[in-house]
Image (cartoon, rainbow, N blue to C red):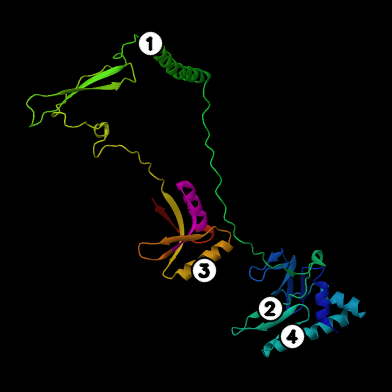
Amino acid sequence: MNINQHISDLLYKHDCVILPGFGGFVGNYSAARVHPINHTFYPPSKNILFNSKLKGDDGLLVHAISVAENISYEKAKVALQSFTKECLQRLKEGRTLTFGKIGTLRKDVEGSLLFSQDNSINYLEESYGLPSFVSYPIIREKIHRQPAAKFIDRKPTSGQHKKKRAVYIAYLTIIPLLFLLGWYFLPFNGDEDSNTQESSFTLTTEQATDPVVIKKEIPVENTEFTPNEVEETLPPPEGSISEAALEKPAPGSNSAIFQESKPLYLIIGGAFRFKANSQKLIAQLNLKGYNAESAGLSRHGLHMVCYLKTEDKNEALMNLAIIRKQDNPSAWLLKRK
């Protein structure tokens, strides 16, 4: 008579099966779960526990044995009592009890009962035909995402403001035209000195006692300015004075306008003493989807590798935050002028 099989059959339909005088097997519902290490998916199941305090005879197991074995209730009860005595004797001797398809039961050093369930059987009928399976994780390559452009909401302008703006634009358009028309229709008297500006330069020298005055004609380009007479002392005329010398700008004058270049922001991923190591890092970053390249030498003579170069500081800071979070927490920002 296989009593272990009768207990196992009853656990499919009942949540508690008591072995009289020994203990009870209790089933609890367990939801579906995923193992975090080996990525195994387990369906919902019924966990089996053993309670040594459930020793009263509820008649469930005796009746099932009597019906399955086609024997009387009394004979089934006697057979069950004999099985219980045998289990208690094995535990007293320190041996491990094995209940087929249910689990194992043994005593620890302190004399407490320890039960281990056999996980090969799922006693939850709703999970019939749902085996466990392994789903390996999908390894995706990290993609460098460009930060989205920020859109600035502008406040709507009123109609009155738009009207004033249109008037200003009209004034700015008409005023230059009036100046051009006034210059074009100025009266012309035919005098040669009417369109010229007279200026006298007086230069004193040690060789001449009397100053010599030279007049130079400068064309008038704007009618709003009146000619001013300036005297400059010249030596006796031994040669002519070149106009290029008079028009040469003084030293230190702002004769050229220099346009300041914008600073360049580099996201540095590492610095190496040997150039070969920096080239290895560049190859690895390019495989990940970055446009990595060499950033030259640092002030300590190390070969630097950068993820990105840009003139936009906000773009550099946003990319630096993404790279630190997803790829390299030790990346830093370098500014070059």
| Earlier sequence position, callout 1 versus callout 2 | 2
Q: Residue 179: horizontal and vertical position, in percent?
A: 40, 16
User: What residue is pinned by disc 2?
Assistant: 115
Residue 111 magenta-drawn? no
Which of discs 3 and 4 lies nearer the camera? The answer is: 3
> Which labelled disc corresponds to residue 280?
3
The CA span between labels 1 and 3 is 76 Å
Residue most extreme to the bottom: 93
Q: Secondary structure at mark 4?
A: helix
* Magenta stretch bounds: 304-323
Pointer 4 with pointer 2, Cβ within 8 A: no
Which of discs 1 and 3 lies nearer the camera? The answer is: 1
Q: Residue 112: horizontal and vertical position, in percent?
A: 63, 80
Which of discs 4 and 1 lies nearer the camera? The answer is: 1
Quick one: label 4, few (<14), some, or many (20+) residues within 10 Å?
A: some
Q: Secondary structure at mark 3?
A: helix
User: What residue is pinned by disc 4?
Assistant: 87
The CA span between labels 4 and 1 is 130 Å
Residue 311 magenta-drawn? yes
| Earlier sequence position, callout 3 versus callout 2 | 2
Q: Amino acid at mark 1?
A: Leu
| Earlier sequence position, callout 3 versus callout 4 | 4
User: What residue is pinned by disc 1?
Assistant: 186
| Earlier sequence position, callout 4 versus callout 2 | 4
Please say if 201 is above or below 143: above
The CA span between labels 3 and 4 is 68 Å
Q: Nearer the viewer, residue 30 or 241?
A: 241
The CA span between labels 3 and 2 is 56 Å
Which of discs 1 and 2 lies nearer the camera? The answer is: 1
Q: Amino acid at mark 2?
A: Phe
Please say if 29 is above or below 5: above
